[in-house]
Structures are given as structure tokens and as C-alpha cells.
Amino acid sequence: MNVGDETKAVKLFSKQLLQAVDAVHGAGVIHRDVKPNNILFARGGKIKLIDLGGAADLRVGTNYDKDETVFDPTYGPPEKYLDVKGVGNIFGAAAGWASGKPDLFDAFSCGMVILQCACPSLRKGKAMNGVKRDLNVYNYDAERWRDTLSEKRQEDFAILDADGGKGWDLVVGLLSQRKGRTSVKKALGHLFLR
């Protein structure tokens, strides 16, 4: 990220990831497969979101089927399916977006990626599989899940806990159940990213 400090790098990465996903959403598209393998580092420390093979264009209905699920089970949200009214109808899609909030689908995945980026032990192997399983056990209440971790594992959250825990607050909001989840657009205004 060309910043020389891991905490600043995680903040910058998080902001750029959320901006990239927000740009996709701005085009009326839900990515549906936000994960580390679909993020590239470009020149100048910028990140690029790739692999739109599972993306759904909600303006025209391309690649959208309400009964189809497309995502990596480790990074995907608990709800699994997009159900948006008015897909394929320029006026209906806008109303469907406002009421159905399909952007929350990618918001969860962003939270998983940011958590993995910020916590060194979660960058290894299949560590995120265990996180997803544990979050499911605690009904996607990241606070409850974290409270069960050992003191040694708590040290792994140092970047998220810095500056009064602003990073952890951001991740908790993104990893919540759909009803209480922070949207990508709202996350971009979070204090952790300033």
C-alpha cells in the first residue's frame, strides 16, 4: 500500500475496497464474490476488484435469478440469496434497491476481508473458514464471538482495536445479520477510514 505502517495500510486497503465495491454498486451491480482472490494490487498502491463472473446487474437483470446463490461460502453473507423487486426495470430496480438493500450482500463480504486483512493470524490457510463457522454459531454477533476468544487471540485484533476500537466497530457493523448490517456507503463514512 506504499504507506510504511501496517495500521495505515489496513485503513487504506479497507477504504479502497469499500470504494471499489461502492463503485460497482453505483452501476447497479452486486459483485456477489468479494474475497481476497478477487482483489488485485495495482501500481501506486491502488486496489482493483476483479472477477465479475458472479455479478448481477440489477438494472437489466443480467446474471440475476432470485433462486440462485453465487459466492464463496467463507466470505459470503448468511442470507445466501438476493431477492430484489423490480430487477430488469429501470424504475423498479431503483425502488427495489432502496427497499431490498442488495448492497448489504457485498457489505458482509467486505467485513470478512477487512477482518482477515487486519488480523495476522487470520491471513493463514483456511483460518477464515473457522471464523465463518463461529460467527454462525453466535448468530453473526461478532462481539459475542470475540468475547469467547482467548487473551492471546485478542492480541490479534490490535489494528482494529487501535484508536478506541474504531476498526473493530466497523467490522462488527459489516458482519451483522442483514437487518442490522452497515451498508458499504455508510461504512465509507466510518471514523476508522479517516
Image: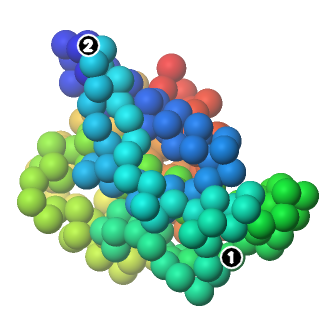
| Residue 136 drawn at (x, y percent) | 39, 77
Q: Secondary structure at mark 2?
A: loop
> What residue lies at 62% left-to-right and 53% top-to-bottom?
29
Q: CA distance from mark 2 to mark 1?
A: 40 Å
Quadrant for residue 56, please give it: bottom right
**Closest to the observer: 33 or 104?**
33
For badge 1, the amino acid type reads: Asp
| Residue 84 drawn at (x, y percent) | 73, 71
Q: Residue furthest bottom?
A: 67
**Closest to the observer: 160 or 75?**
75
Image check: 90 left or right of 42?
Answer: right
For residue 135, say whether it is visible.
no
The first of marks 2 and 1 along the sequence is 2
For residue 22, say whether it is visible.
yes
Image check: 129 left or right of 191?
Answer: left
Q: Is residue 133 above or below residue 28?
A: below
Image check: 64 left or right of 60?
Answer: left
Q: Is residue 61 above or below residue 11?
A: below
Mark seen at residue 168: none
| Residue 44 drawn at (x, y percent) | 30, 14
The residue that label 1 is drawn on is 83
For badge 2, the amino acid type reads: Val
> What residue lies at 38% left-to-right and 46% top-to-bottom?
50
Q: Is residue 78 above or below residue 189?
A: below
> What residue lies at 74% left-to-right and 58% top-to-bottom?
59
> What residue lies at 90% left-to-right and 58% top-to-bottom?
91
Quadrant for residue 9, please give it: top left
| Residue 62 drawn at (x, y percent) | 63, 66
The residue that label 2 is drawn on is 3
